[in-house]
Image (cartoon, rainbow, N blue to C red):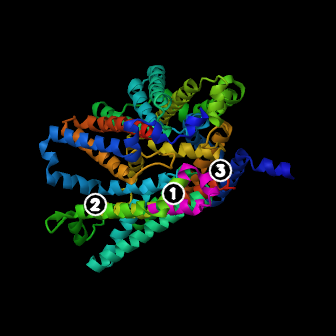
Amino acid sequence: MAETATVPSYRRAGGIGRVLERYPFLPALVIVVALLFLNGFFSPNSLSFRALTGLLSTYMALILLSIAQTYVVYAGDIDLSAGAILSLVNVAIVVLMERWGGGAGAVLLALAMGLLLGLVCGLVNGLVVAALRLQAIVATFATSIFFTGLALYILPVAGTPAPALFWRAYGGRFFGVPFVFYILAVLAILLAVLSRTRLVTQLLAVGDDPQAAYQTGLPVVATRVKGYVLCGLFSALAAFCITGDTASGDPLVGGKMTLYSVAAVVLGGSALSGGWGTVVGSLLGALTIALVNSVVFFMGTPSEWQNFVQGLAILLVLMAGVLAGRRGRS
Amino acid sequence: MSRINSFLRQPIVVALVLIVFLLYLGEALSPGFATGGQILRLLIVASLLGIIAAGQNVVILGGREGIDLSVGGVVSLSAIIAGNVMNGADGGILPAVGACLAAGAFFGLLNGLGVTLLRIPPLVMTLGMLGVLQGLLVVIRMGIPSGQAAPALSRFVTQPFAYGIPGIIWLWIMIGIVMALMLNRTVFGHRIYAIGSNEHAAYMAGVPVGIIRIALFVISGMFAAIAGLCLLGYSGTSFANVGEQYMLPSIIAVVFGGTSLAGGKGGYTGTMAGAVLLVILQSILTTINIEESGRQMVFGATLLLLMMFYGRGRAMRA
């Protein structure tokens, strides 16, 4: 028995297992394609270029937030404050853009400040969880209350509009191609580069077995802190997208998105226990949530039943994601 | 000296010392904060949180990253079921209790089955269930009005019941005693600790691990249902997503009570102190005259500060 346990898993796994090990996000991709097909079946119009662009610009924030969540989940941590960071950056950049006049320079400077704010929030989380060694779930819930307070201080009630320059650019086209596709392209390059960095490998190593990682000489605490910083930065990017989509500031906009970001990570086949996962899976997981909502709408579900059917469908795909992910690993 | 030191480091002692300190602080900030009637009001709110935390507590004790995020949804659902079944009539209380417990047990059972049979991580399973429950609440709300609490139920929760103390606080004390006996004196209780600290060893020793873990989620659902019922009595009528605000605080109360989120270590008596501590802290923040934003920042920072007193993880050693 002991002998078989040492055999690398891919040799034991069958064909499907081997493919899943190589492409862990495959189940999520299958689900996304199936949902696209269902969307087209119930409403051919929903697969039009225009409709898909709309879907993407609405859910780009969730996609980025799910990617943000993935980097902390890699290391076996969790960030329940990601949505609060999104809200905080959202109100901060909107207020700054307004204060600085709403010109192109003001917008860029405000975005830079937003990134810095996301970085600082992530650093706070990282220090609290990894350096002070508080339990991630409760500690990041506490910081989420703090960040929400800060967002309420900056903008007590929702409503300050973002400058037209900003949301027109986000919803607009350049050379005939919608802006969100440029975001998607840049994101793809960014993720590809990141996935080749030492940091991501270290995050996965820490998540797989912190003790072993420590004994190998990895700076475990620093790595986990960096994971949270990365999460803060991507949460800030998500805030840019939600600001482009809603064209205004709202101190509570991200509150509900945190748990969806966790769900998207699981849908993408990543293990919440850490050490195993892909950001592409999380992107597909966020798209799954978007498409489930859209299918339920186009199916003609009575409005009062929509939330229930969405909740049930997401629970079912969550379970499917976990089961498929396990198959890939076992 | 070292004996005193280890006594002072016990989570429940930490919580009690902090409670006394916060009561003094509250009294200093706004005279009248720590009077008898005011403390009873605090305890009513704490008992609502504490009853939910009882279920959360056993699920966490059972280990394997046990956690129940669906309690908020079950509390809301139970409040609305109770409101409709009793609809302002005392005669409807018993059927309402039965209906709420059945609903809580049902959703707890689904959670437990998903976690044990399909081996879905509890966080994922209960998170998905929360979404289902929230959707179900929308369906129910569109179809029927939210319903009214029976006068007797409202009296039980808000008015003195025996020896000048409201019934819900007596109920909470009873739950505390039953939980302490169950965890420390029964086979079931010992088995909870066993599967929480080492599931494999417990399985090898013949403990029916799966059945016990399912039971823990059922218990959690039922405690959340009881809390929803009491919450209806507290507010008179149920309103949208009334239970959601208790979801994460119920986990914090457990942590402040000294139960480790890793499972297998802790107890409910500490959780009760943790719930009181959390409610007093919130209450102090509402009495001092600052903006909502400042209140939230102070609350978040204080929670972090308090967590420093409790089960911090161990540093890495080679």
Query: In the image, which is nearer the foreground, mark 2 or mark 1?
Result: 1
Viewer-closest of A189 and B66 = A189
Badge 1: residue crowd in 10 Å (few <14, some 14–19, many ≥20): many
* Highlighted magenta segment, given as a residue range: A206-230
In the displayed structure image, the side of residue A15 where residue B216 appears, left or right: right
Which residue corresponds to the image point at 59% horizontal and 61% vertical from the top-left? A218
**Between marks 2 and 3 in the image, the one whose residue lies nearer the viewer:** 2
Is B170 on the left-hand or right-hand side of B141?
A: right
- Name the subunit of mark 2: A
- The residue positioned 62% from the left and 32% from the top of the image is B199
Task: Give the distance between the C-alpha atoms of the residues marked 2 and 1, in whole angstroms.
Answer: 24 Å
Q: Quadrant of the N terminus of chain A?
A: top right
Mark 1 residue type: Leu
Q: Which residue is mark 2?
A: A184
Q: Quadrant of residue A33?
A: top left
Q: Which residue is mark 3?
A: B34
Q: Position of residue B148 (x, y in %)?
A: 40, 31
| Residue B30 visible in this rendered orientation of the protein | no
Percent position (x, y) of residue A211? Answer: 63, 52
User: Mark 3 is on which residue type?
Assistant: Ala
**Mark 2, other Cα within 10 Å: few <14 / some 14–19 / many ≥20:** few
Of A65 and B120, the residue lying toward us: B120
The chain letter for the residue carrying disc 3 is B
Residue beneath label 1, please?
A: A203
Structural distance between the alpha carbons of marks 2 and 3: 57 Å
Asked if both marks, 1 and 3, belong to the same chain, the answer given is no
User: Could you tell me what secondary structure mostly forms the magenta stretch?
Assistant: helix
